[in-house]
Amino acid sequence: MGAVRSDWLRVRVSPADREGAAVLTRALEEHSLHTVCQSARCPNLPQCWGERTVTFLLLGDVCTRNCRFCAVSTGWPAGRVDCGEPQRVARAARALGLRYVVLTSVDRDDLADGGASQFAAAVRAVRELSPDAGVEVLIPDYRREPLAELLSAGPTVVGHNMETVRRLTPAVRDRRASYAGSLEVLAEIKQHSPTQPTKSSLLLGMGEESGEVEEALEDLRAANVDIVVLGQYLRPTPQQLPVSRYALPAEFEALAMRARAMGFRGVVAAPLARTSYRAARAYSELQ
Amino acid sequence: MDISIPELGDVDEVRLVRWLVGVGQTVQAGQELAEVEADKAVFVIEAPAAGVVREIISAQGESARPGRVIGRLEVQ
């Protein structure tokens, strides 16, 4: 039995949002691109797309992992990679006049480098066609050479999500992911590139206790993460984990204050906050 | 002018939770007309223009696909 949804998860869809979203939909279809906004059934889609903020989903729309909170399809793409995708992302970003581009991907355990070279190619392609745009990446658990390859492309911000607290990670994320492993990814980014801004997200409402959220925030600070995002877990379809509780807006405000006191330079905490939600604004807090 | 369910990414179907206006009612541009519910949130459909609600096609509680016309507005 899940929790009862609260009134603050009510999203107004204005005619302007719908017009903006229609322009974006046409551009995505024209360039044959996927977005996590669509795949995750994100409730911010009308507003973000209305403002021409979009998170491109690289490497197809089939993920090799099966996290229990995520609606993206699971499968084994057997090494298939669309080599034209980085250029199409860059052309779409330029055509839409995007000033801040967010790139993420499905997990690709079927590829030797996990798809890191595709990320790097996409970052470079966007930079070439939109030299003034920021390019944020939200990556799988890349380590060593694949991580170095990605960082060599010079992304504006590198995100890697913890998603939940230590105790719940085995029940929430795919068995190939781990709490310690994700912290190591974030720490390794800073070891490789000490000035590279990093980011991570936690979702509330999966059964965590408040002390465990505090511990996760402390662990992220110990890994020198710059930006933290805290949002409410929302079940995308009845097939995913039920929502254990709806955190009050005041709890997000208190967590945001706590996170800032811990030393995070950028904090986004709200029921509908997601990793890429207001990404450009979160990055601007670092300047 | 049509009143329709917004496109919501990969959401296949929503439930019309309730109408916030009735037939014959004058509405302002941006006024809340109806609430529809997907798995993750409730979405509020705003009036695309000022006018009078002329027809309610889908009833409260019905399921509908994004893009479907659920009512009509006579623009004034």
Image: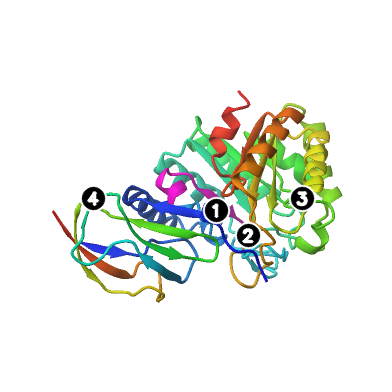
Q: Magenta stretch containing residue B34, yes or no?
A: no
Are the residues under marks 4 and 3 on the same chain?
no
Q: CA distance from mark 3 to mark 1?
A: 21 Å
Of badges 4 and 1, nearer the viewer stands 4
Of badges 2 and 3, nearer the viewer stands 3
Q: CA distance from mark 2 to mark 3?
A: 19 Å
Secondary structure beneath label 4? loop
Residue A88 vs residue A35, the one in the foreground? A35
Looking at the image, the residue that sits furthest to the top is A287
Of badges 2 and 4, nearer the viewer stands 4
Q: CA distance from mark 2 to mark 4?
A: 50 Å
- Seen in the image, is B50 located left or right of residue A135? left
| Disc 3 packing (10 Å; few <14; some 14–19; many ≥20) | many
Subunit of label 3: A
Quarter in which the C terminus of chain A is drawn: top right
In this rendering, the answer to whether A10 lies above or below B58 is above
Are the residues under marks 2 and 1 on the same chain?
yes
Give the residue at mark 4: B28
Residue A85 badge:
1
Residue B49 badge:
none
Q: Residue at x 81, y 37 (%)?
A: A218
In this rendering, the answer to whether A5 lies above or below B68 is above
**Quadrant of the rendered structure where residue A148 is?**
top right
| Disc 2 packing (10 Å; few <14; some 14–19; many ≥20) | some
Q: Residue A198: give x, y in percent of width and height.
A: 70, 36
Q: CA distance from mark 2 to mark 1?
A: 9 Å
Secondary structure beneath label 3? loop
